[in-house]
Image (spheres, helix red, strand yellow):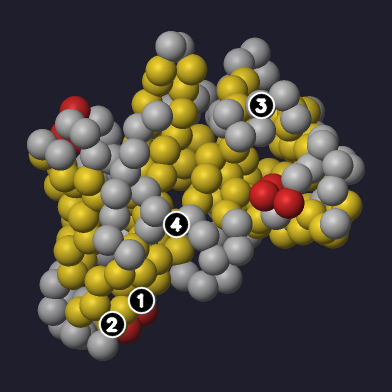
Amino acid sequence: QVQLVESGGGVVQLGRSLRLSCAASGFTFSSYGMHWVRQAPGKGLEWVAVMSNDGNNKFYADSVKGRFTISRDNSKNTLYLQMNSLRAEDTAVYFCAKDALEMSTLFDYWGQGTLVTVSS
Amino acid sequence: SYVLTQPPSVSVAPGKTARITCGGNNIGSKSVHWYQQKPGQAPVLVVYDDSDRPSGIPERFSGSNSGNTATLTISRVEAGDEADYYCQVWESSNGHPNWVFGGGTQLTVL
């Protein structure tokens, strides 16, 4: 069965950096696009970034463009999110989510999430 | 960017039918997906492409989409259906794709 396990969250100071990881199993990782979606405490879902299955295409939400970088290592079945210049409004649970195809319109499986808290 | 509007909350008695709406400009021309999220858990896809169900999702969950409103319908509501529900679409502006969520609807089973 599909499993997505995020790690790397924690408390980080304003302006600092953090790297999240998402270990995938139960499917052919290199065949599917992968996303990061976040959820601020008590708020709704916000799409953050996507990378196509082969790594050739990536896109970001305007709120993180220029600060966050998505990457993947298909040999390790792992997705990453490098977060720089963190702001208070980046505080959220970060979910990795599997795309239904190489890059489609929906997310068919989600991880349990990892909490990032940006403090002053 | 594209905006999806959901009611903050919907309440329904057990055994009745719950309808959760998702409003957007000409949303009927887009594919709408619905996710269920229980407290402290990851979202789960319950309806995709307006009205299809992933394997394992009960037939009680159905969807429709026309004009400016998409609707998630849950028939014969059970206590276990109590959760937040989010609609989602994909849009592209100037070649830049964006995956858009509604604000979410909290379903309360009375």
Can you tell which of label 3 and label 1 is closer to the viewer? 3
Q: In this view, which residue lies farthest toward the left?
A: B67
Which mark is on residue A65? Answer: 3
| Identity, as a three-letter code, of the amino acid under mark 3 | Lys
The residue where tag 1 is placed is: B82
Numbered disc 2: what chain? Answer: B
Can you tell which of label 4 and label 2 is closer to the viewer? 2
Q: Quadrant of the C terminus of chain B?
A: bottom left
Numbered disc 1: what chain? Answer: B
Can you tell which of label 3 and label 4 is closer to the viewer? 3
Residue B93, percent from left and from top = 41, 18
Cα distance in 3D space between marks 2 and 1 = 6 Å
Image point 19% across, 85% down: which residue? B13
Which mark is on residue B44? Answer: 4
| Identity, as a three-letter code, of the amino acid under mark 2 | Val
Numbered disc 3: what chain? Answer: A
Disc 3 and disc 4 on one polypeptide chain = no
| Identity, as a three-letter code, of the amino acid under mark 4 | Val
Q: Is residue B33 visible?
A: no
Residue B10, percent from left and from top = 25, 71
